[in-house]
């Protein structure tokens, strides 16, 4: 996960420059990318889901919960993300 390493390095850079509040946006973006990449992996997987105990369904449920919390404004790290008719907006 090269992008994850990049974001962690950027977060460390912001912290070293005394801009710790900017790292919250990095955490939220990283969380969104993590959930999105798991959903993309699920839909690109050629192996069919044959039972309800498949771990990929758990990943999809977590992604759905993340989006539900995001929409309701209880997003935790991602509380500054807002879903609008125009897409996803980050507000510091």
Image: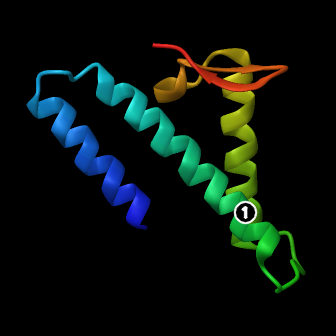
Q: Position of residue 85 (x, y in %)?
A: 85, 20
Residue 28 higher or lower than 6, as above or below: above
Residue 58 higher or lower than 88, as above or below: below
**SS label for mark 1:** helix
Q: Residue furthest front?
A: 86
At 16% from the left and 31% from the top, the residue drawn is: 15
Residue pointed to by mark 1: 40
At 40% from the left and 36% from the top, the residue drawn is: 27
Q: Quadrant of residue 23?
A: top left
Q: Position of residue 13 (x, y in %)?
A: 17, 39
Residue 2 higher or lower than 45, as above or below: above
Q: Quadrant of residue 50?
A: bottom right
Q: How many marks?
A: 1
In the image shown, does 73 or 58 lie closer to the viewer?
A: 73
Quadrant of the rendering where the C terminus is positioned: top left
User: In the figure, is residue 90 to the left or right of 71?
Assistant: left
Q: How is the image coloured?
A: rainbow
Q: Residue furthest bottom?
A: 47
Residue 53 higher or lower than 12, as above or below: below
Rate crowding at label 1 as few (under 14), some (14 to 19) or many (20 or more) other CA atoms within 10 Å. Answer: few
Quadrant of the rendering where the N terminus is positioned: bottom left
In the image shown, does 16 or 77 lie closer to the viewer?
A: 16
User: In the figure, is residue 41 to the left or right of 30?
Assistant: right
In the image shown, does 19 or 49 lie closer to the viewer?
A: 19
At 61% from the left and 50% from the top, the residue drawn is: 35
Q: Position of residue 41 (x, y in %)?
A: 70, 69
Q: Position of residue 46 (x, y in %)?
A: 83, 85
User: In the figure, is residue 32 to the left or right of 59?
Assistant: left
User: In the figure, is residue 50 to the left or right of 40?
Assistant: right
């Amino acid at each position: 996960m090269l992008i994850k390493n990049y974001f962690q390095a950027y977060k460390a850079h912001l912290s070293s420059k005394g801009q710790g509040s900017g790292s919250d946006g990095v955490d939220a973006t990283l969380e969104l990318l993590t959930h999105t990449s798991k959903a993309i992996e699920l839909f690109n997987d050629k192996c069919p889901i044959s039972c309800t105990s498949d771990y990929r369904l758990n990943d999809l449920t977590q992604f759905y919960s993340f989006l539900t919390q995001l929409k309701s404004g209880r997003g935790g790290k991602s509380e500054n993300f807002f879903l609008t008719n125009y897409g996803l907006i980050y507000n510091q």
